[in-house]
C-alpha cells in the first residue's frame, strides 16, 4: 500500500506509539523508596522481596521485607533482624542473601569472630538451619559478601574478598554443614589496581579518600541449570566462570581446579551479577550509574543508565515474574568512606527491569 503525503504524519505517530508500547517492558521501574540503604536482594519463588540493609550504614534491622505497598518490616521478625543476644538469636552483619527454590532465605551473617549461614523458611515462617563456617575456612580478615545456591549439588558458594592477597571462594555443603576454601589468591578472585571513579569522586581506602581500594571477589552467581558458576573481583576487568561439577570434585588439586577456569568476557567494576538461561550476565556497573550485560559473545554493553536511580547499584536478583531487581546503596557516599560525613541522600531505591531471557527466581 502506498502511503500518501497526506497520511504520512499519522503513520509516523502510530509507529512511535507502537514502538513505545513494545518497549514498555524494558524500562527501569521503581519498586521501593527506602529510608535505609539496601545491600543485596532475595526474591522468593512466591515473589516476596527480602533485602539486607547495608552494614556500612549501621542499620537497626539487618534484614527487611519490602511489602507490596512499598512499606517494610523486619525479616524474619524483630528478634532475628536485630543484634544477637546471649542466646545467639539475631543477626550481626548481613550483606549476602538469597532465596532457594523452596523459599528458604539464606543469610550470610558476619559477626565479631564468627561467620555463619542462617536459613529461614519463608513459607513456614520458622528457622530452617544454621551453618557455622569455622576457621581456617574463615580467615581473620574474612568478610563473606555474596552467595550462590546450587540445588543440583546441594552446595552454597560464597565470595570472600578477604585481603587483597587472600580472596577465595568458600564451598558449603548444605546437608553436612562442612565447608572448604578454594582458589585462594587465584587471578580470577584477586583485585586489579583500577581506580573507582564515580562522577567527580574517586574512592579511597581511608576516610580522607587516600589510596586505591583493593576489592576482591564479590559478585557471584550460578546459571539456572546449575552448570556454571560466574564470578570475579569487584575491582576487575574480567568475568570468570567454572563448572560446578569441578568445584564440588574434592579429588581435584588446586592446580587442577585452576586449570578448569574460563574467562567469559570483559566487564566494568561491579558489585553484583546475575544470569539468565540464555547466558546473559547482568552487571551492576557502579562507575557508570548503570546496569549492563555481558552477552554470550563476551561483549559488554550498558542496558540502563540513571544517575538518580542507580547510584552504586549493588545486589541483584531474578524474580519469578521475569524481572531483575536491583538495589542501589550509594555506598561510595557512606560516612565510613567520607571522613565520617554521610553524603548519601534519601531515598535509596530498589528498581527492576525486564530480563532479556528467562531466568530463575533467587539467582
Image (cartoon, rainbow, N blue to C red):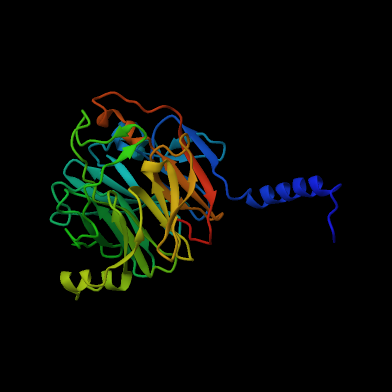
Residue 221, x across and y down, in percent: 37, 58
Q: How many labels does the image show?
A: 0
Identify the image quadrant of residue 100. bottom left
Residue 39, x across and y down, in percent: 37, 41
Q: Nearer the viewer, residue 216 or 132?
A: 216
Q: Looking at the image, which residue is at 61% across and 50% down?
A: 25
Q: Please determine whether, in this image, residue 251 is positioned above or below residue 93.
A: below
Q: Looking at the image, which residue is at 53% across and 40% down?
A: 31
Residue 33 visible in rendering: yes
Q: Which of 106 and 187 is in front in this view?
A: 187
**Quarter placement of the C terminus:** bottom left
Q: Looking at the image, which residue is at 63% across and 48% down?
A: 24
Q: Nearer the viewer, residue 304 or 271?
A: 304
Residue 288, x across and y down, in percent: 40, 42
Residue 360, x across and y down, in percent: 48, 60
Position of 10 with respect to 35 (left or right) is: right
Q: Which of 171 and 312 is in front in this view?
A: 312
**Quarter placement of the N terminus:** bottom right
Q: Looking at the image, which residue is at 72% across and 51% down?
A: 18
Q: Please determine whether, in this image, residue 169 is positioned above or below residue 76.
A: below
Which residue is at the far bottom?
A: 251
Which residue is at the far top?
A: 341
Amino acid at each position: 500500500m502506498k502511503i500518501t503525503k497526506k497520511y504520512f504524519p499519522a503513520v509516523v505517530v502510530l509507529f512511535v506509539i507502537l514502538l513505545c508500547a513494545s518497549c514498555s517492558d524494558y524500562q527501569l521501574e521503581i519498586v521501593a523508596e527506602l529510608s535505609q540503604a539496601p545491600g543485596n536482594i532475595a526474591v522468593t519463588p512466591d515473589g516476596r522481596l527480602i533485602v539486607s540493609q547495608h552494614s556500612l550504614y549501621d542499620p537497626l534491622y539487618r534484614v527487611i521485607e519490602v511489602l507490596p505497598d512499598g512499606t517494610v518490616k523486619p525479616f524474619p521478625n524483630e528478634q532475628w533482624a536485630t543484634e544477637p543476644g546471649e542466646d545467639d538469636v539475631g543477626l550481626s552483619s548481613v550483606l549476602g542473601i538469597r532465596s532457594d527454590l523452596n523459599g528458604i532465605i539464606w543469610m550470610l551473617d558476619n559477626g565479631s569472630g564468627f561467620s555463619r549461614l542462617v536459613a529461614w523458611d519463608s513459607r513456614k515462617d520458622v528457622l530452617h538451619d544454621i551453618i557455622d563456617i569455622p576457621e581456617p575456612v574463615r580467615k581473620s580478615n574474612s568478610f563473606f559478601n555474596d552467595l550462590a545456591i546450587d540445588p543440583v549439588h546441594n552446595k552454597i558458594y560464597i565470595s570472600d574478598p578477604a585481603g587483597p592477597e587472600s580472596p577465595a571462594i568458600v564451598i558449603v555443603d548444605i546437608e553436612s554443614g562442612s565447608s572448604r576454601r578454594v582458589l585462594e589468591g587465584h587471578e580470577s578472585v584477586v583485585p586489579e589496581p583500577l581506580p573507582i571513579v564515580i562522577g567527580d569522586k574517586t574512592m579511597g581506602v581511608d576516610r580522607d579518600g587516600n589510596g586505591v581500594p583493593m576489592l576482591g571477589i564479590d559478585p557471584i552467581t550460578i546459571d539456572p541449570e546449575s552448570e556454571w558458576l560466574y564470578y570475579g573481583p569487584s575491582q576487575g576487568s574480567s568475568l570468570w566462570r567454572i563448572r560446578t561439577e569441578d568445584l564440588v570434585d574434592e579429588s581435584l588439586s588446586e592446580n587442577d581446579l585452576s586449570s578448569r577456569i574460563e574467562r567469559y568476557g570483559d566487564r566494568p567494576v561491579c558489585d553484583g551479577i546475575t544470569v539468565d538461561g540464555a547466558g546473559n550476565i547482568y552487571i551492576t556497573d557502579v562507575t557508570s550509574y548503570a546496569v549492563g550485560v555481558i552477552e554470550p559473545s563476551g561483549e559488554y554493553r550498558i542496558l540502563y543508565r540513571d544517575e538518580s536511580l542507580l547510584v552504586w547499584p549493588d545486589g541483584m536478583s531474578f524474580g519469578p515474574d521475569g524481572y531483575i531487581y536491583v538495589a542501589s546503596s550509594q555506598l561510595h557516599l557512606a560516612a565510613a568512606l567520607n571522613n565520617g560525613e554521610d553524603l548519601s541522600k534519601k531515598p535509596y531505591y530498589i528498581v527492576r527491569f525486564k530480563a532479556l531471557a528467562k531466568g530463575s527466581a533467587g539467582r
